[in-house]
Amino acid sequence: MVKESIILLFTVLSILCSFSIVSAEGGVQQPPERYKSSSNDDTESKAPSRFIKFAEDENYVYYLDKQDSGWVRRPYTMDKYVIEAWVKMVPYEYAIHDMYSPEIDDSRYFLEHYLVDPPNKKIQFMCEIEVEGGRPHNNVTQRKYDHKNWEPLIPESVEDTVFHAVVDKYGKTNENNTWKTIDEIIEGLFTVRVMKEIIQMGKI
């Protein structure tokens, strides 16, 4: 009887010891995905960049603003298109830092507006805006479109670099681009009719 009691006591003690060891080990463990999931959430919630870095030189780092750039109808035409491009030029000393973000920086930069004609390999400068310590204002006077302002590309110039970066992003043609509103169709037809009348009058 005493022997059986001793065996039972040892059995109970061994069971209790095993429970305490398991609970102690479990107490120091952290959920395996606790911190990974929060970092993934931060990555997923972060909006994609609107800027594409495409070049740099000893003075500036160049970013294409893909949100406000793209194919637009060429003025005074019905079925011809050009690429409108906004380029952000950030001084090299700011943009080389690892933590630099073109989305949040507002210290000092330039915005340049271009029209790009891929089939004819020409570019037209519209305006340049200098921004210091804030956002640009929406009251900038730009050059009016003029077919005489198209410029041929000069190799290794800033315009040449912008041209090729824009074409790489949006392609050389935009065959699928069509009018989305009846107002644009009417405007295009009216423009063509007026141009024909001017040509018949010998003004062009």
Image (tube, helix red, strand yellow):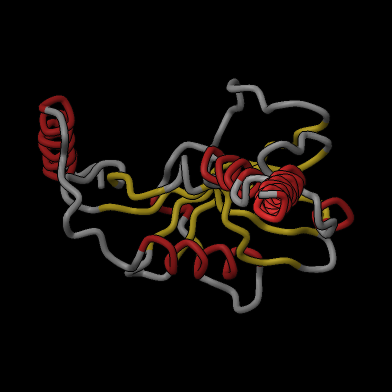
User: Which residue is at 76% across, 38% downward?
Assistant: 105
Residue 150 pos. (x, y %)? 46, 58
User: Which residue is at 65% across, 77% downward?
Assistant: 156
Residue 26 visible here: no
User: Can you tell which quarter of the image residue 38 is in?
Assistant: top right
User: Which residue is at 73% across, 48% downward?
Assistant: 13
Q: In the figure, 7 relative to 40: above or below?
A: below
Considering depth in this image, is 64 or 145 the residue closer to the camera?
Answer: 64
Considering depth in this image, is 54 or 12 the residue closer to the camera?
Answer: 12
Residue 200 as seen in the image, left or right of residue 99: left
Q: In the figure, 150 relative to 70: above or below?
A: below
Residue 165 visible here: yes
Count how many numbered circles sit on residues in the image.
Answer: 0
Q: In the figure, 108 relative to 117: above or below?
A: above
Residue 88 as seen in the image, left or right of residue 77: right
Q: In the figure, 142 relative to 85: above or below?
A: above
Residue 68 pos. (x, y %)? 46, 40
User: Can you tell which quarter of the image residue 146 is in?
Assistant: top left
Taking the view exactly as shown, the residue that stands out farthest to the right is 93
Residue 54 pos. (x, y %)? 61, 64
Residue 152 pos. (x, y %)? 50, 69
Residue 150 as seen in the image, left or right of residue 20: left
Considering depth in this image, is 113 or 64 the residue closer to the camera?
Answer: 64
Considering depth in this image, is 129 or 194 the residue closer to the camera?
Answer: 129
User: Which residue is at 38% across, 60% downward?
Assistant: 170
Taking the view exactly as shown, the residue that stands out farthest to the front is 1
